[in-house]
Image (tube, rainbow, N blue to C red):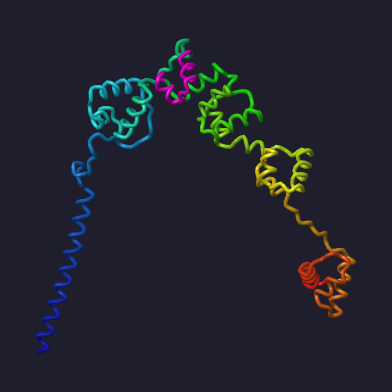
Amino acid sequence: MFRLLGTRGWHVRTNAVTRCANFHVNAVAKAEKVIHRPESSQPKRKPGGAERGPRRLWSAEELQNLKQMYEKGIPKWEIALHLGRSRCSVAGKITYSRDSQRWTHVKQTWDESEEEKLLVLHEQGKTWAEIGRILGRSLGSVRNKFSKIRPSLSLHKWTDEDHEIASKLHSQGYSASRIGRELKRPASSVAYYIVGGQYQRQHAAKPWTPEEESEMFAMHNAGFSAYEIAEKLGRKRQIIASRLRPRSKVMPCFSRSEDADLKKLRGSGKSWKEVRDAMASNRTVRQLRDRWSNLTSSGK
C-alpha cells in the first residue's frame, strides 16, 4: 500500500513539471510570433483616411482639385484618398468653400460696384454674413471694408440722447440693425452697447458728482425708492442702494488709559456689562473681552 502511494505521488510531481515546461514553451513561442509579425498582418487604416500629422494649409492646387472633384459628384472619401487628407478635413473645407463661395486663397480687390452694392445691402438691413454670401466675401472682409467706407458710423461716441433713443426702440421690439439705421450706427455697435448692456456698465462706472450725491440724498429723504432714484440718475439700483446704506464706523484702537481702566475694573471683579457701563468710551462687551484676552495672553 505504501509503495502504491509513493508511486502515485511520483507520477503527480512528474506531470506538474511537464505542464509547467509546456506552458513556458508556449509563452515564448507566442512572444516571438508577436515580435516577428509581418507587416501584412498589422491593422489597416480605413479607406479615405490619412495618417494624423502636423496640420498643413490648403494650397491653391488642392483647392482647385477639390472644387473640380466636388462638382463632378465624387464621394468625399474618394476625394480625401486622392488628396491625402482626412474625410473630416475635406468635408469641412467643402462646407466652408460652398457657403462662402470662396474656392481660392487669392485676395480680390474691391471695385466701385462692389462698394456701392455693399452700402445698398447695408441700408436694406442685411447682416454681415448675408452680405458676405451675396458678394462672395468673408464676414471680416465685408465689415472692415464698410468701416473704411463709412468711418463716421463707428467713430463717434455714444451720447445720453443716443442711448435713450436706442433703448426706447429696443424696448419696442426693434432689431439692432434697424436701430443702427435710425442712429446711423453699425448694428454690431448697437448690439454691443444696448442689447449687451455695455453702455449701462460704462455709465455706472463714471465718478459721482456732488450734484448727483445731493440729489440722491434729497430724493431718499423725500421718500423715493432706490429704483426711482436709479431711473432718475441713470444709475443701477444696486449702486444707489449701496451708497444709501449706512456705513459702520471703524472704532479706534485702545489707548493706554483705556487699557489701564479695563485692567482696574476687571481686576476688581466687575462683570463685563458693569465694565462696559463704567468705561468712558463706547465699547461693546465683545470688544472689551477681546482686548482683555489680548492683554492677558501677551502679559502686558
Q: Picture coordinates of residue 192 (x, y %)?
A: 56, 33
The residue at the point 58 percent across, 32 percent down is 168
Q: Quadrant of the N terminus?
A: bottom left
Is residue 127 placed above or below 203 in the rendered structure? above
The residue at the point 49 percent across, 19 percent down is 123
Is residue 258 placed above or below 213 in the rendered structure? below
Decide if residue 157 is on the left or right side of residue 111. right
Closer to the camera in the image, 119 or 292: 119
Q: Picture coordinates of residue 27 (x, y %)?
A: 21, 59
Closer to the camera in the image, 141 or 237: 237
Dominant secondary-structure state across the stretch colored magenta: helix
Q: Is residue 131 magenta?
A: yes
Closer to the camera in the image, 2 or 144: 144
Q: Quadrant of the C terminus?
A: bottom right
In the picture as drawn, the residue positioned furthest to the right comes out as 257
Residue 30 quadrant: bottom left
Q: Which residues are magenta?
A: 116-136
